[in-house]
Amino acid sequence: MTKMIFINLPVKDLDTAERFYTAIGCEKNPQFSNENAVSMAWSDAIVFMLLKHEFFSTFITKPIADAQQAVGALYAFSCEDKAAVDAVTEAAGKAGGRADVRDPQDLGFMYSRAFADPDGNIFEPVYMDMSAPIEAAS
């Protein structure tokens, strides 16, 4: 069985969140979606579970953090090339998120940008040339 990761995110507006995640390239899985949650697959192994605040609260005992005010996590995910990093970041900005919440980073073998979703969660699409660090070390 493939190991997967499910990133559960509290969202204020489920419809807005679904439109945003569709715009950045995720696909909705209706089998695991309802009026309280939407399952959005980034890949076969990475799924964003968008949960209404009320529903999210049933899984936790602490208050929900306001991601517009504080950062609790940075979600990095790989892209196939620099153009894909740029494309997803630009799509995020056009879909109601904020593109380039920090300066882009280009280290030659690694390139990344960062964006925030409508709820303030920060994502870092990154491209890494996996052969470059090995060549640089020899």
Image (cartoon, rainbow, N blue to C red):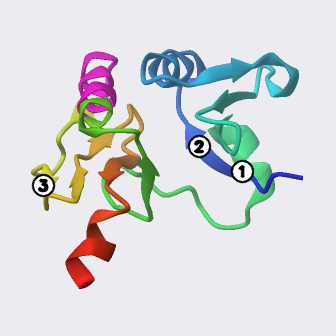
Kind of residue sitting beneath label 2: Pro
N-term mark: 1 or 3: 1
Q: Secondary structure at mark 3?
A: strand
Kind of residue sitting beneath label 1: Ser
Relative vertical location of residue 124 with respect to residue 132 in this rendering, above or below: above
Residue at position x 26%, y 17% in the image: 94
Cα distance in 3D space between marks 1 and 2: 8 Å
Q: Secondary structure at mark 1?
A: helix
Kind of residue sitting beneath label 3: Asp
Q: Nearer the viewer, residue 7 or 137?
A: 137
Q: Which mark is residue 57?
A: 1
Relative vertical location of residue 47 with respect to residue 64 in this rendering, above or below: above
Cα distance in 3D space between marks 1 and 3: 38 Å
The residue that disc 2 covers is 10
N-term mark: 2 or 3: 2
Q: Position of residue 124 (x, y in %)?
A: 34, 50
Q: Which residues are magenta?
A: 86-96
Left-right relation of 120 to 12: left
Left-right relation of 103 to 45: left
Residue at position x 33%, y 61% in the image: 70
N-term mark: 1 or 2: 2
Cα distance in 3D space between marks 2 and 3: 31 Å
Residue at position x 32%, y 31% in the image: 84
Predominant SS of the magenta segment: helix
Q: Residues within 10 Å of mark 2 (few under 14, many from 20)?
A: many
